[in-house]
Amino acid sequence: MPTDAEITFADHVGRFYARRYSFPPMVGRLLGYLSVCDPPAQTIAELSDALLASRSAISGAIKSLEAMHSVRRSRAAGERMDRVTIDVSSQESLGLDSAEYQELVDLTSEGLHLLGDAPIERRAILEEMNAYAEFLVERMPVLHEEWGARREQLVAAGRLPELPSTSRAGRP
């Protein structure tokens, strides 16, 4: 059974993600709880009981987090239910995936093409968004590599564990 402090923490994380990213509060609460619960892999029923939420609310939050590659489901041999854990092995879950910024480059380029030879004042917002997105597309792979090196240092120093062997290839 979770402690009051764990539930309070989950609520704080839920409010943070709701305020900063407009996530439904349950999505953030689930992230918060999964980051402090013991054991770290929980069933939908366990999460529902711990967070005093319906199974459908938990399932919906899990689907949202799976779409962002922030959680993963697993099932041990012989088990009949999935267990959910936070997944920090992907670029997407770390916020280092440049694909979303490339999509923004493409969209702003389309808008700039639409505006053609319009005055710079009219193009300014799209020009800035385009330049910033191009900058992020360029920097994300570098940040990902830097994080991988930093993570290796933290593992060597005993501050972080090795990633589980189930992590995907090419991930830090």
Image: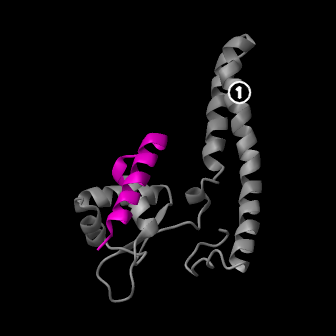
Front residue of this view, candidates 135 and 3: 3
Q: Is residue 39 magenta?
A: no
Front residue of this view, candidates 43 and 138: 43
Q: For residue 36, what is the image quadrant?
A: bottom left
* Residue count near mark 1 (Cα–Cα under 10 Å), binned few <14, some 14–19, many ≥20: few
- Give the structural element (helix, strand or loop) at label 1: helix
Q: Residue at x 32, y 64 (%)?
A: 4
Stretch of the chain drawn in magenta: 1-26
- From what the image shows, is residue 172 above or below residue 100? below
Residue under pointer 1? 128
Q: For residue 158, what is the image quadrant?
A: bottom right
Q: Residue at x 71, y 59 (%)?
A: 144
Is the magenta region chiefly helix, strand or loop? helix
Amino acid type at image mark 1: Glu
Residue 132 coordinates in the image, percent (x, y): 71, 35
Question: Which residue appears farthest toward the top when viewing the image?
Answer: 119
